[in-house]
Image (spheres, grey):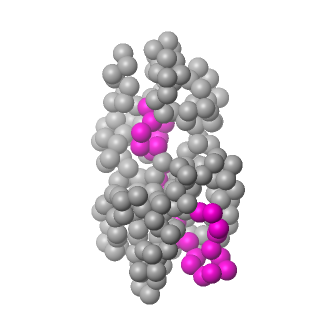
Amino acid sequence: MFSYENKYKNIGLIAGIDEAGRGPLAGPVVCACVIMPLDKNKIIDGINDSKKLTAKKREELFNKIISVAIDYSIVQVDEKTIDEINILQATKLGMKKALESLKTKPQVVLIDAVKIDTNIKQENIVKGDSLSYNIAAASILAKVFRDRLMVEFAKTYPNYAFEKHKGYGTKEHINALKKFGKCKIHRDTFIKNFF
């Protein structure tokens, strides 16, 4: 998990960026950027790609990450923007905003698979959330933040069971869409094939 961090550790502070929610039919895409301390006594055990962790473990790690991070930011790009500019461009926009929202400027940014427009040196790593400590930490921040958001949306839109599937296209979600139609947070460009 530290090979990329070790590669750049002599340059200065390293940030990791990742997103959650590129695939769902509803809700925002959430992007997180985090600069984790790399001194041995502050390394958090168990940080990994958020998809490989249980929800309980992600929640635990989320709190640890924000307590030790040198800096972090979490940005959401809403479904209207996703529909207007497409999910890839919305993801890039969110990642760029997350990086620019940091109060501490990193010298290097490691990004999960995507290239963004920035003057900061960047490395784009396929499956970066499994290969970089900073990207994995960002993936946990983005995933937990987005999951919490979707649980809140479920209270406003109880017909869709967002608290269960977090907006992804499960059978239950698609059946609810067909029965109740769309709600305010659905992505029109993602659901057009279901009607």
From the viewer's perspective, tell me whether residue 119 is left or right of residue 103. left
Q: Quadrant of the C terminus?
A: top left
Q: Percent from the top left, x then y, of residue 111?
A: 40, 63
Magenta span has 35? yes
Q: Percent from the top left, x then y, of residue 113?
A: 35, 58
From the viewer's perspective, tell me whether residue 133 is left or right of residue 192. right
Report the span colored magenta.
Answer: 21-47
Q: Is residue 12 above or below residue 58?
A: below
Which residue is drawn at the image coordinates 36% and 59% (left, top)? 126
Which residue is drawn at the image coordinates 51% and 61% (left, top)? 136
Look at the magenta stretch and give its main secondary structure.
loop
Task: Count the marks.
Answer: 0
Q: Is residue 79 above or below residue 29?
A: above
Q: Percent from the top left, x then y, of residue 128?
A: 42, 62
Q: Percent from the top left, x then y, of residue 53?
A: 60, 52
Magenta span has 159? no
Residue most toward the top?
Answer: 179
Q: Is residue 118 above or below residue 152?
A: below
Which residue is drawn at the image coordinates 38% and 25% (left, top)? 191
- Residue nearer the viewer, 192 or 170: 170
Residue most toward the bottom?
Answer: 10
- Residue nearer the viewer, 45 or 91: 45
Q: Is residue 101 visible?
A: no
From the viewer's perspective, tell me whether residue 92 is left or right of residue 180. left
Q: Is residue 186 visible?
A: yes
Which residue is drawn at the image coordinates 34% and 69% (left, top)? 123
Q: Is residue 176 above or below residue 121?
A: above
